[in-house]
Image (tube, grey):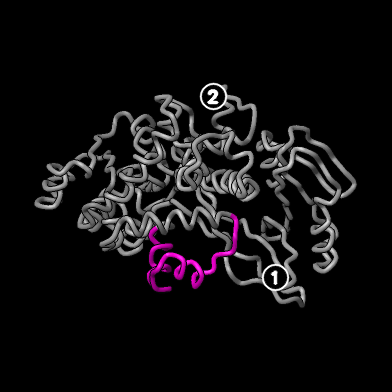
Amino acid sequence: MIKREILDKLLQLSSKFPVVSVTGPRQSGKTTLIRSSFPDYRYVSLEDPDIRLLAQKDPRGFLGTEDKMIIDEIQQVPELFSYIQTITDEKDAAGQFIISGSQSFLLNERISQSLAGRVAILHLLPLSLTELQTDGRSYSSYEEIIFTGFYPRIYQTGIDPIDFYPNYLQTYIERDVRLLQNIKDLNLFIRFMKLCAGRTGQLLNLTVLSNDAGISVNTAKAWISVLEASFIIFLLQPHHQNFNKRLVKMPKLYFYDTGLACSLLELRSSEQLKTHYLLGGLFENFILAELQKNRFHQGLRNNCFFWRDHKGSEIDCIIDNGDQLVPIEIKASCTFSTSYFKTIQYWKKISGDTLCNPIVVYGGKTDQSTTDGMLIGWQNMTKLFDMLR
């Protein structure tokens, strides 16, 4: 088992809260993590129809009198939340229940209704580059890791990405999508996902997307919400600090896992990726997803935005630390150019933030300090995270 960075936070929160919730995409390693972290807990999965029926018919008897219990895919039986509330209030002890699920919307909705103030919420995303490197894995090119993706089963079993992702997608459609949304034409939904993959790293224009998919704008909006709730995509919001310039208000679309995006784009190898028109967007997606993992696996909220004005000047990422903004440009090229800092210099001028520490993450391997800012190679995410703390 590859050690997950979220482990320490999970154990810490379980010693403080009566309930800890672990959500994340299907197959991100939630079950493996919580079962190995709490070996003395009773484990049940509500994916099992027989166990699910028992929980529905007799919730109190199902929960029993035990102090420690793991309930997997708990959103399948929402009635349990009220009973868990009663039990935790009566016993008033930390670490009574560890619950998990792959649909954040359904889970969070029930938590806010029944378990507010009693539960700590963590999000487990697929493996990070740092976790893979700590496990002794290395990659000759970023195209290889982008194409392979980060789902644990790929590394656990050695399965080829071109075999894993189509089956993963089918499972996701049949289980999560049907539960979240009553979609009659699943082939149309898959086409919609492929259109989203073709917009990786681009502004999300729902009108254009809905026209291309042959659906209404409201349907497109609902389907985007489904993909967000099941941790397939995330929307990077624009940073709205006002510099007396008109700013773009649309978010940008990214996938939590680049391997899935590559599969939806029907790429068959990392070699194909090298000449693909979306290489730059996928590299940008790769770095931004690593930033998301780093925050979520520390139990922190997203603090990543992008900036773009009406003239098209854009910074790929703005890290907002509250008292400090850190501009980050992301470039797929393996060769450094001083032009990489050009937009950041423009942003510093109009924002008046002359004390910020600009960063460029690029496709090369050499880290270098320049007069304009810090240049970091794609393999050195640890150094990037250290600079952002």
Q: Residue at x 35, y 32 (%)?
A: 38
Checking the image for residue 241, the label placed there is 1
Q: Residue at x 49, y 33 (%)?
A: 4
Checking the image for residue 135, the label placed there is 2
Furthest toward the top, the residue is: 136
Q: Helix or strand or loop: what does disc 1 sit on? A: loop
Residue 60, placed above or below residue 41: below
Where in the figure is residue 278, as x and y percent of width and height?
A: 60, 49
What span is colored magenta in the figure?
A: 201-226
Residue 238, placed above or below residue 363: below
Q: Is residue 356 left or right of residue 132?
A: right
Q: Residue at x 49, y 37 (%)?
A: 268
Q: Are marks 2 and 1 in contact (CB under 8 Å)?
A: no
Q: Along the polypeptide, which appears first: circle 2 or circle 1?
A: 2
- Residue 307 falls in which quadrant of the image? bottom right
The amino acid type, in three-letter code, at marker 2 is Asp
Q: Residue at x 55, y 32 (%)?
A: 131
Where in the figure is residue 45, as x and y percent of width and height?
A: 24, 40
Magenta stretch: dominant secondary structure: helix
Q: Is residue 375 left or right of residue 125?
A: right
Residue 254, placed above or below residue 164: below
Q: Helix or strand or loop: what does disc 2 sit on? A: loop
Residue 312 lies in the magenta stretch? no
Dot 2: few (<14), some (14–19), or many (≥20) neighbours within 10 Å? few
In terms of depth relative to the viewer, which is nearer, 213 or 325? 213
The amino acid type, in three-letter code, at marker 1 is Gln
Quarter containing the N terminus = top left
Dot 1: few (<14), some (14–19), or many (≥20) neighbours within 10 Å? few
Where in the figure is residue 10, as x and y percent of width and height?
A: 44, 40
Residue 213 lies in the magenta stretch? yes
Q: Is residue 362 left or right of residue 146?
A: right
In terms of depth relative to the viewer, which is nearer, 172 or 87? 172
